[in-house]
Image (tube, rainbow, N blue to C red):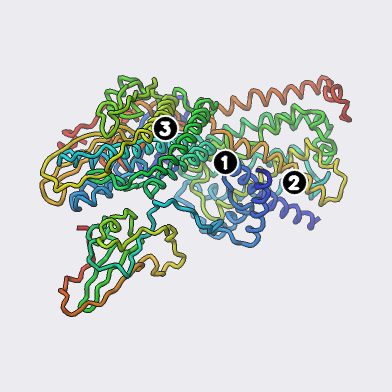
Amino acid sequence: MASGFLKDLLRSFTVGIAGKTGTARSAAELEVPPAYRGTPIIDPEKCILCGRCGKVCPAGAIALRTTPTEKTVRIFVGHCVFCSECAMICPVSAITMSKVWNTVVTDRLSRDTMNEREIKRPRSKDEKASSDRPSASR
Amino acid sequence: MTVAGVNERGFAKLKVPIGPSHPALEEPARFLFEVEGEKVVDVDYEIGFNHRSIERLCQERPFSKIVYLVERICGICSHAHPLNHVERVEDIADIKVPERAKYIRTIYAELERIHSHMLWAGIAGEEIGYHTLFMYTWREREKVLDLFEMLSGNRVMHGCNTIGGVKWNISEEQARSAQSALSYLDTTADKIAKAVLKDGSIAERGKGIGGLSKEDAIRLGAVGPNARASGVPEDTRVMCKYAAYGDFDLEPQIANDGDVVAQALVRLAELKQSIHLTKDLFAALPEGPIKVEYDEIPPGRSVGRVEAPRGELIHYVETNGSRFFERIKIRAPTLANIPSYVPKFLGCQVADIPIIAASIDPCFSCTDRVTIIKGGKRTVVSGRDLKTGRI
Amino acid sequence: MIASIIIALVYAFVAALLLQGIRRIVVAHSQFRKGPSIFQTFYDFFKLMGKESLTPNVTSPLLFNLAPILSTASMLVAALIIPLAATTSAVGAGDMILVIYLLAIPPIALILGGSASGSPYGAIGAAREVALLIAYETPFIIAMVTVALAAGSFQLGTISATAWVTVLPLAAIAAIWTLPAAAAVQPFDIAEAETEIVSGPYVEYSGPNLALLQLGQWLKTFLYASLIAAVFFGTAIYHYEPIVNLIIQFAIIAVLVTAFIAFWQATTARTRVTRVLRYYWTIPTALAVVDLILYLAGVRYMHFLFGWAGV
């Protein structure tokens, strides 16, 4: 205990002098258990853009948009509650709950948590058009 | 300055507001104490700051999403609310949940009780200025949260309940890790009990403070560990035998006088009881499926209760055959415990206010109806009073 | 003279804040955590100096704004009078009675500021600070006066020529016992109890006002401990270079602070203000009075027991 204390004391001195206060002490990768539910990720190869994930999301974090030329599905990680309903309902198992838990961004204007996991697919001309609205929680 | 003069002994009469934002409270509530010197002579109380219109939101979302909404009523009781909710819906639709699912639900409920009582021990220490006890108990509580994370994927808001069963299964390996974690927690519970009960400063700050007699507890409608600390032998797990509690013999843990030391005794005894019960649950986990499918929920009504860590939690659910609920009503245990604040606060010192406020283990996030209680007058506000506008 | 004044002031400032850092780290390690950087108090101070100082709608803005200045100014003067590293202090005229008066000014500034702050929390905090002040000053003053009696003079230079703990250990115990109350940590942080009265007298202060009020308290803790170190552990007996003297004295103070402030803070809860008076007016006062009476009666028990070279 004493040597750990002295090491910490020394580190306090050096960190303090170097002026690096306020940042996290270590950005070490924490081990998460296997069942951990992190950020949901859509596998672009498998996703068929059916939109079931958007309908079932309790937080309204998945937006499925259809324009005349393309279909997009996006998960807004900032709204996600990590319940994994989307992963359970996906018929092709395209959504997995990754182990990513550190969703903090340092740039306030970054689009990392807003438009993450965006899948686009161009629409063929004979697909039926659906109304252009993001998924709501109804 | 809100000094209302000086009383006959020369002490200043002040009105001291505690809340809505105050370091003594984890969640917002407003107490207005009339104080002479250091002695409290009157208390006025206001809640409703955390009203989030959850019952209204429940009417606008389809069934599958309500479990997640109800779960987020409170972070500490985040399993009791969805448990009660899905049990009500299963009652309406007459869904028979498999035994394994019932046991898993009970395991989560007991683990939640463990982590909630450790949290209470830390908060009680923090309120009297004993920061080390706070840091220690919350550090050990991390083991319980790690256990939750291992079993369900998240520390709170587990999302394990669903209509018809549970979503996550418990594997052999997880059960083994859980058993060893619980053995560690068993020794920790002894250490916490020793630190809380045998410590001079806690006994000095807690003995005889905030007492509540058994008659008052019954008359004011106190529930849960708050009532059991005053000698009322009621435990919803024993009375209603929901989930898997019917297979186990539980005795309500009781203390007398209702003061802070009695509250600590009851909660620490329940901590040990829950640890042993959880070990038995893991050992006796039956095989089988964890979920049954259901067709649709017919119109109907159901009301029922579970024992949340803070007391008796009542849910009323009404369906009308459509995709949405007709009405959901939730009566959180803290709402029933609030009237018992009145005898506890009168006559105490200002220094005792935070520990008495924390001693009934309030969770104002669960409480979302406005009630006004005037200190000194022993009135309970009834529904009729609210409807006729007498309040 | 000017140089020694500046050096003493700067040293007092740096040492006081460093001591707070040490206290926070020791408390944190007792609680199984790492604690902030040792310079965290410096960062807090300079951050507050850069913020805006708001005066609420109070009855007496003069008193409200005067309290922090009073607190810090008195402590800076005391830093010049207490021997920090040698027999003589920076301006060479260290009188014990004056120092004791000066050390009582930061609590009085808290009381003034709390009462003038217009908030019930400030009023309750000020009332509690009054009780605390008269509680812990009693054994402290009796112990100090006993030492002055034994030394034959109130001049701190003369007093710190002997390590009085070897002659009057009971008085030393009484004086050291009042350290946690002087530093306002558990179990005696009742004037600024966060969970009860939201910082007490500090509640309406912000910006440089708050920085100076807190600085007064930090300097008081340091100077209180260094007075005890100078009087009872005799700084003048270390006949080394001044810089080494300084380090030795700082080390003694750091040990005192760690053992009697930080460990007490980590292991106890807060007491009630009614109990504090009874606590300090019984055993610590009794110890100091016993030592006084024994000294006046001519009983030199330490000389008898240990044959030390006392007076």
For the N terminus of chain A, the quadrant is top right
| In this rendering, the label closer to the viewer, 3 or 1 | 3
Question: Pointer 1: what residue?
Answer: C31
Can you identify the residue that label 2 sits on? Answer: C250
Whether tag 1 and tag 2 are in contact, CB under 8 A, the answer is no
The secondary structure type at the circle numbered 1 is: loop
Would you say A129 lies left or right of C44 here? left
- Residue B233 % position (x, y): 32, 22
**Residue B32 picture quarter:** top left
The subunit carrying tag 3 is B
Figure quadrant of residue B358: top left
Is disc 2 in the same subunit as disc 3? no
- Pinpoint the chain carrying mark 1: C
Q: Are marks 1 and 2 on the same chain?
A: yes
- Residue B72 appearing in the image: no
For the point 66% across and 29% down, the residue is C138
Precedes in sequence: disc 1 or disc 2: 1
Pointer 3 residue: B275
Q: Residues within 10 Å of mark 2 (few under 14, many from 20)?
A: many
Give the Cα separation between the discs numbered 3 and 1. 25 Å
> Helix or strand or loop: what does disc 2 sit on?
helix
> Foreground residue, A20 or B358?
A20
**Host chain of mark 2:** C
Residue at image location 57% in from the left, 33% down from the top: C268
Question: In the rendered structure, which amino acid carries the disc numbered 3?
Answer: Ile
Q: Specify the amino acid type for callout 1.
A: Gln
Q: Residue at x 53, y 48 (%)?
A: C64
Relative to the observer, which residue lies in front, A9 or B348?
A9
Q: Is residue A47 visible?
A: yes
Measure the alpha-carbon separation of dots 2 and 3: 49 Å
